[in-house]
Image (cartoon, rainbow, N blue to C red):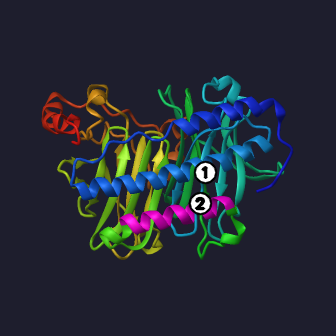
Amino acid sequence: MASGTPATGNVAGVALILLIAAVQAPVWAAPAGTAEEALLAEKIESANNEFRKNVMKVLNAVAGEQGLAGVEDFIMVSPWTVGYSPVALLGGVAELPLEELERGRDIVLADFCIPPGSEIPSGTYIMRVKKVGGEWVAELRDLEGRTVLQKRAIVEYGPFDRRLPGRGYDIYSSNAGVRFGAQLREAAFYMDVKLGSGEVAADRCTPEITEELARFRSRVDSAFGSRFKTSGDLLIVTRGDALLIAGVSGNEVVTYLRAPGIAGGIYRASPATGKLAGAAGGELTGEVRDMSAYSKLDAGLIGGILGERLILGYVGQELSSFKVVLPIKKAPELAAMQALPAPAGSAEEAEIEGAGTEAREETAKPAYESAERESGVCGPTAVALLAALPLAVRRLRPGG
């Protein structure tokens, strides 16, 4: 990473954010499965906590060198053994009104380690949003202040209860790519980066993060990959409030998943239905998309978290190509029940993200700004609550 002179005025702010990060390790409950599954979850979560603590230090150091007020949270998506892009929400911007953002503000610090031929080279960047001629624009600058990419921003209007970094690896505009940005108080802003092909050159990436990812993957492969005999690279998605580890095992995608509104544990995703069956019972159902039209892209496992939407799927030749989008907004009715899984609503109620959004983005203004934002998911019905109650009681027992 490029070095610079630390901004002394931000030292206190960075120190505070580092202190908060140190004490805010993700909270998780052992899955309601076997003792072996609980031990597996403990190993995965321990590796995740160590990775997040160390990468947060790296990101905060860079933010300080750039005169920024540290980072509040980050999401990292890694679909390959070498390859990642932690995307961090910058401190002090989440509550800004739209009028302030319109004048131009930096909102995200992102570090990309991606294949050659991508829309941008591997490196560390700052994402700024602003309004130009009535249009929201997302601008990506390197640490020397050079603009390397500028395009119309993907905007979802709030207000939102939570301020969250977002990052997805998916099919956008018929190509494998990255969507990243942040959900702020009044709006969420994202931009897409088209990915190239070929092997990621690790020597062009940030060594501190590359080394941390290698350690993280080694521990996860040992605990998860060997247990389920997965083939190919594991998909890793980690954010302060959620963790997803996924691999192809036989004719299905097996995952370790923890997120708001979803009980932590092992789930198996069926390409035929897109439903995720829990090892301890129960089923997660989201918005399912057929991705067979993109199978020749061989993108492999796809996924990420954008706002309060978790994406998981597969695009390639080994399995039927599919994608499922799960809402991860905690329902008030289940808050005291450790956020047990509840059935998603109808297609109209579900928040949608993924292939096909490019068509909506090209519609006439202001449709492009609002089409990406779907209605929030309604709370679970009384039937769903009653169905979840026995599992809730079991999970609240000691050792449950």
Asked whether 218 falls inside the magenta stretch, the response is yes
For this view, does 216 lie left or right of residue 92?
left
Which of the two residues, 189 or 205, is positioned nearer the viewer here?
Answer: 205
Mark 1–mark 2 Cα distance, whole angstroms, equals: 7 Å
Q: Which residue is mark 1?
A: 54
In the rendered image of this protein, does residue 96 appear above or below residue 115? above
Q: Is residue 339 visible?
A: yes
In the rendered image of this protein, does residue 177 appear above or below residue 75? below
Which of the two residues, 397 or 187, is positioned nearer the viewer here?
Answer: 397
Which range is magenta?
A: 208-224
Q: Main secondary structure of the magenta part?
A: helix
Task: Write the residue at 69% across / 34% down.
Answer: 15
Q: Quadrant for the C terminus, please.
A: top left
Q: Give the structural element (helix, strand or loop) at label 2.
A: helix
Task: Write the residue at 53% across / 45% down.
Answer: 166
For this view, does 147 lie left or right of residue 19?
right
**Horizontal and vertical percent position of residue 171:** 48, 60
**Horizontal and vertical percent position of residue 54:** 61, 51
**Horizontal and vertical percent position of residue 196:** 61, 69
The answer to whether the residues at label 1 and label 2 have Cβ atoms under 8 Å apart is: yes
In the rendered image of this protein, does residue 254 appear above or below residue 103? below
Under mark 2, the amino acid is Glu
Asked whether 282 falls inside the magenta stretch, the response is no
Q: Which residue is mark 2?
A: 212
**Horizontal and vertical percent position of residue 103:** 74, 29
Under mark 1, the amino acid is Asn
Farthest residue, direction right: 5
